[in-house]
Amino acid sequence: MDAHTMSEPPRTADAFGPPAPVLSVSPVTLPSPGRAVDLEVRVSAPVTGSDLPIILLSHGQGYSNNLSSLNGYAPLAGFWAAHGFVVIQPTHLSSKTLSLDTGDPEAPMYWRSRAEDMSRILDRLDAVEAAVPQLSGRLDRGRVAVAGHSMGGHTAGLLLGARLTDPHDGTEVNLADPRIRAGVLLAAPGRGGDALTGFAAENYSFFLTNDFSEMTAPALVVAGDKDASTHLTVRGPDWHADPYVLSPGPKSLLTLFDAEHGLGGISGYDVAETTDENPERVASVQRLTWAYLRSELYPGDPAWQTACDALTAGPDPLGRVESK
């Protein structure tokens, strides 16, 4: 196991090259028979470049009315798109912007539908390109990653191979999508069982059987060492490291010092629900996640190692990275 110490990124220069102008189009509506409403997504991409890799970004829940939708996570989506990725963000059925009351047994989190949204997007990339003519012929469909925050991290984990037992019929659920080559889990839920609070076990019963032993795809797990999530777990902040600890390699874990559930403010700029607002921390998440996915999707690319090495200097480390 190797370890790096991460410190504040340099403020005088962007080690990732200058950001490109970004185009962002929303809503792009994908007709979705059998879904409560049609699937709407936001597509963000650099205005130039070809053979662009894809990141599917799954929103969390949170308290706000709009961040848990295609309108959230601008600090991540904008950075990734400005540095060469096409970012596609769905509004999941769990979004407050929809306020659905479908009677679905998986409501209000719609854990299965969330993962299915991402596979549906990959099935419909032709429709996405048709709706955003500036993207025509510019996607690299062989290089796809998934990222998600909080409940979105749970969604990303399922797509990367994590399993659970359906609390309604007892069947094992496998929603892994082999088209997705790597992922980033940000403040994602950990294991179930006795790690959960009574509230979580009762209200989020699908968490009870979280199983990371089959999550074989490469992933970066990002956890804040002050992210106690006391409404969900009795374990404390290390619960959010479970997707790293309990899954097989290759995996990396980025632990952010003094970070709470918002990881400095990744869900939006200046949002009220961020309890640990810290632009430097957000900048580190931007850079480390970009570099990780770049190196995973392009084997031999030194971005990840370079980013870790570059962030070791400085007297006040913001976190640490370890890998297996």
Image (spheres, grey):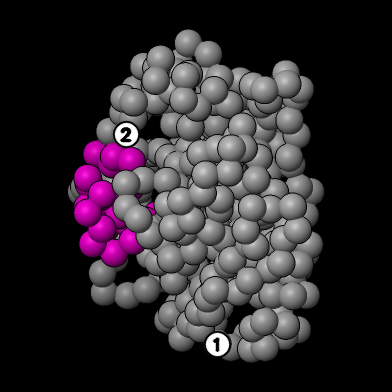
x%, y% of residue 61?
42, 46
Mark 2: amino acid: Asp
307 w.r.t. 164: above or below:
below
Residue segment shown in magenta: 258-287
N-terminal label among 2 and 1: 1
- Residue beneath the point at 71% across and 67% down: 31
Q: Is residue 7 visible?
A: no
x%, y% of residue 66?
38, 59
250 w.r.t. 294: above or below:
above
Looking at the image, residue 229 sits to the left or right of residue 203; the answer is left
Magenta stretch contains residue 216? no
- Residue beneath the point at 61% across and 32% down: 105
- Residue beneath the point at 34% across and 26% down: 231
Q: Secondary structure at mark 1?
A: loop
Q: Is residue 120 visible?
A: yes
x%, y% of residue 87?
56, 68
Residue 47 numbered mark, or none: 1
